[in-house]
Image (cartoon, rainbow, N blue to C red):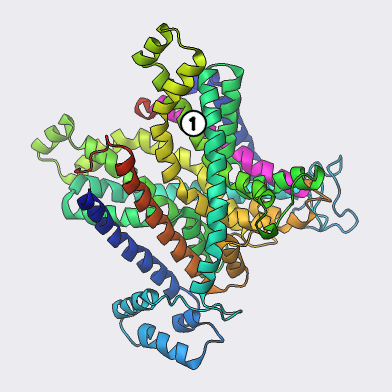
Amino acid sequence: MIFRNLIKNIPALLAAVVLVLLTLAASVGPLLVKRDILPNPLSMDLDSLKQPPGAAHLFGTDNKGRDILSRVVYGARISLSVGIIASAISLGIGVFLGLIAGYFGGLVDVVLSQIFDIFLAFPSLLLAIGISAVMPPGLTSAMLAITLVGWAGFARLVRGMTLTLKEQTYVEASKALGASSSRILCRHILPNALPLIFVAGSLRVGGFILIEASLSFLGLGVQPPTPTWGSMISLNRSYINVAPWMILFPGLAISITVIAFNVLGDFLRDKLDPRMRA
Amino acid sequence: MWFYILKRFLFSVPTFFGITLITFILMQALPGDPVQGMAGERASPETIARIRAELGQERPLPIQYVGYLKLLLHGEMGRSYYTNRKVSDDLLQKFPNTLKLGVAAMLFASLFGISMGVFAAIKRGTVWDRLVALISVGGISIPIFWLGLALMLVFSLYLRWLPPSGMGNGSLIYLILPAATLGTFSLSYIVRVTRASMLETLSQPYIAAARSRGLSEFAVVFRHALKNSLIPVVTLIGLDLGSYLNGAVLTETVFGWDGLGRYALDGIIKRDYPIIMGVVLFGAVIFVVMNLIVDISYHFLDPRVNIRK
């Protein structure tokens, strides 16, 4: 049903196509480099520094003569994996703690909710900066920072849903039949909350990719020479006037990816959750 | 009313403890000795002794945390490794600049956000409506640092209308690009909420009544509908303060704006930990305090909000 709706909704369909193509490019990128179809993103070519976009280099080259197209493709690997993995982990933590807080209530709820609120009290990028600054910068620290920033929002959402769902008659019936708490949570509450959880997750992937790009831009993400979209922009900033393509393409890549995730997230929300419709 | 304010105030106390606990844990995770980490490498022996008295590693962790709170209460947030200046002094000196940028960004976001939202609502279903929707999706998706660089490239380097960076002794022309960059994210949400709220108000019976009385469309939209659709928008503007603090780090970095954000970046580049921790802590406290103020002010502004709840 969702698939049939997707075909009718042109922006959402476009977004899905973009994401599929991007994932495809990110996964076959290394293969293309091995076959010499795409230049190695790390190999410097001192004869073609700061080349504008052209036949030899579709997106041009940077100040070390590296091919920007292949660096953008490799950057997609990091952005997509950080965005998706961080969403998945923070969703996992958020769902687990949100279910517990909402279902058991009482003191457990008070304590857990207070913890959610504390994490939500930080402006997200500042907290991520604090976390990634104390660790050696890299993929792990960026992912950990984004996860720690993101889980509390999911937890609060799931707690709210659990509060409503646990009052439903089927939960009462199951309780009357002597079902254990864990059975009620896993068999009744979680499956009913799942579509909304999925929507919330898909709406946040874009935001997480933006945080990863921001951390990379500030020098706190995956370190050079490994290309990331954020670091490509920050490292080439000083050439903005002479060679704007060096920052144009990585920036376009981030924007298009995040727009695609947001459009698709909005679409899923409209389809899966009539209550959240704006 | 006072009871509500007091209650709301007390509820934020655990949050303050939580924030300091998190920065305390982050400090423990720093490489090396936390005392040295806070005092800086060029600190005087007295400073080190005073900090060690509170944070000494021979003491159990909870006691160290209490010691950390004591230091913070005395405004002791450590000193920069490089300049040896007190972080607390620097923070207070840079904050007004960030505040100025933030206020300008908020004005930009509110002014253009509300106008575009109203426009989209009036032109519902047309190409204009779609264009505004596109801008609002773009605004939350485009990375703020890239947007800043793009605006700088077009308006400063190509067209030469506006200065590319710096603060220009407070001249307003230097504020335009950074404020537009910082405000765009918030603008996008304001557009969405204004449009939705306007559409809802326009479908109310009293709007139909106003129209049937023969009032001009202008009067209907601006005098009757807009006024009544603004409450959720004002709420959103207040609650969106966090996005300004987040965005300030990136915007100030791009435009060389001498505020908290660029201060944080300096700290990051030099691995000057007292500065990073100082900005994180200060930013979170500002955020919580501002939310508190916004919350309380609603109860003054909107009599319908039940203060006894």
Residue at horizontal 55 percent and vertical 77 percent from the top: B80
Q: Quadrant of residue B81?
A: bottom right
Residue at horizontal 45 percent and vertical 83 percent from the top: B35
Residue B305 in view of the camera? yes
Q: Is residue B159 a member of the stretch shown in magenta?
A: no
User: Taken as a whole, is the magenta stretch helix, strand or loop?
Assistant: helix
Residue holding disc 1: B192
Furthest toward the bottom, the residue is: B45
Nearer to us in this view, A215 or A91: A215
Residue at horizontal 38 percent and vertical 53 percent from the top: A120
Residue A189 position in % (x across, y down): 25, 38
Q: Is residue A249 a member of the stretch shown in magenta?
A: yes
Residue A30 in view of the camera? no
- Looking at the rendering, the stretch of residues picked out in magenta corresponds to A246-272
Residue type at mark 1: give it. Arg
- Where disc 1 sits, the SS reads helix
| Residue B92 located left or right of residue B143 | left
Q: Is residue B98 above or below residue A72?
A: below
Nearer to us in this view, A29 or A269: A269
| Residue A152 located left or right of residue A214 | left
